[in-house]
Image (cartoon, rainbow, N blue to C red):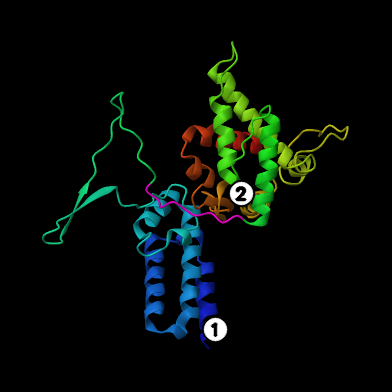
Amino acid sequence: KELAQCTSLVYDYLSKADEEVSVEDVVLACDAVDDAATKSTTLSLRRRSHEFGRYHLLVKLLKSDYDAYVKTAEFLSPSRIARGDLPNVQDVTMNVAPASAIDVDEATGTTTTTATSTIMGEDGQPLVADCDLESMSYDESPLDKLLLSIFRNLVTKHTGGVSSSIPGIEGLLAQGREYMTQQLPEGVTYADHTEAQHTMVKNTLGGLMTPVLPPFYRVFMSGIVPDLGTEYDGKQFGPWFYAPALTSIVTPTFFGFLVGPSKPNRRADGQRGGLVVEKCKFLQESGCKGLCLHQCKIPAQESGCK
């Protein structure tokens, strides 16, 4: 009987049209989840059914009214919906308590919390605060270690021999810093060197993917017709409908050595194919926006577009 009722609940959630879903529906689903969670442990199936339904209500709201979805998600998360349970977090503000200072009165044992003042740079501009998220500890699988080793060897090859004896991701970052800050030859501008960093990373990613994967990806994911001697050579008929979702499934396994743990979620249009990185490993361990942008983010995006 319980299974039949839960099946009916799920059907009711899924059968609701996208344009009919309102913010009130999502709030009522939250109430149903809380009610099932507090009544009895035997109602775990009912609670999970409501959680499943709530997720799909959010997906429907995401598809029909993105702004309403963002406001709803910010209002309900994390107090009633864990951030990790949201189908999309792209523009959903993460509610993190601002940095503060805590003073303890030794005589009475009471504490006083005061907001810390903004730190200003020498030019009078406010400095960017450190990340408010706690630092993550990253576990590396044997595959992560293998891919990182291959990646570092390719970096050495494409930087003209820049290497480091430091193990792990720290060694890769040491290579990146040395290459970024090296003395530029006469006539080479900073813009030239920035482009050289992008090219180095794209060549490294190309080597990591081997000569086989890029053509396979262009044909079977992007839908680009290869050179076959026809009038359609080079034309793009994709990306195919499955490409974004499949990419988001493969990425956590093969790029965790660079970005750390990640998981698939929904894109801004509500379709599958999004990816959420919990906290970027490359950025956390480097603590450098320049390395992040020029030796990871920008060249990786350009490489993906090609």
The image shows residue 240 at horizontal and vertical percentages of 70, 47
- In reply to whether residue 147 is colored magenta, the answer given is no
Sort mark 2 into few (<14), some (14-19) or many (20+) by Cα contacts within 10 Å. many
Tag in front: 1 or 2? 2
Q: Do tag 1 and tag 2 residues touch (Cβ < 8 Å)?
A: no
Relative to 30, say whether 233 is above or below: above
Q: Residue at x 30, y 32 (%)?
A: 126
Q: Residue furthest top?
A: 187
Which quadrant of the structure image shows residue 212?
Answer: top right
| Mark number displayed over residue 3 | 1
Whether residue 295 is visible to the viewer of this picture, yes or no, is: no
Q: Residue at x 41, y 50 (%)?
A: 92
Sort mark 1 into few (<14), some (14-19) or many (20+) by Cα contacts within 10 Å. few
Q: Is residue 18 left or right of residue 95?
A: right
Please state the extent of the stretch shown in magenta in the rendering.
132-140
Q: The C terminus is located in which quarter?
A: top right
- Callout 1 secondary element: helix
Q: Residue at x 46, y 39 (%)?
A: 287
Disc 2 target residue: 257
Whether residue 168 is visible to the viewer of this picture, yes or no, is: yes
Which quadrant of the structure image shows residue 149?
Answer: top right
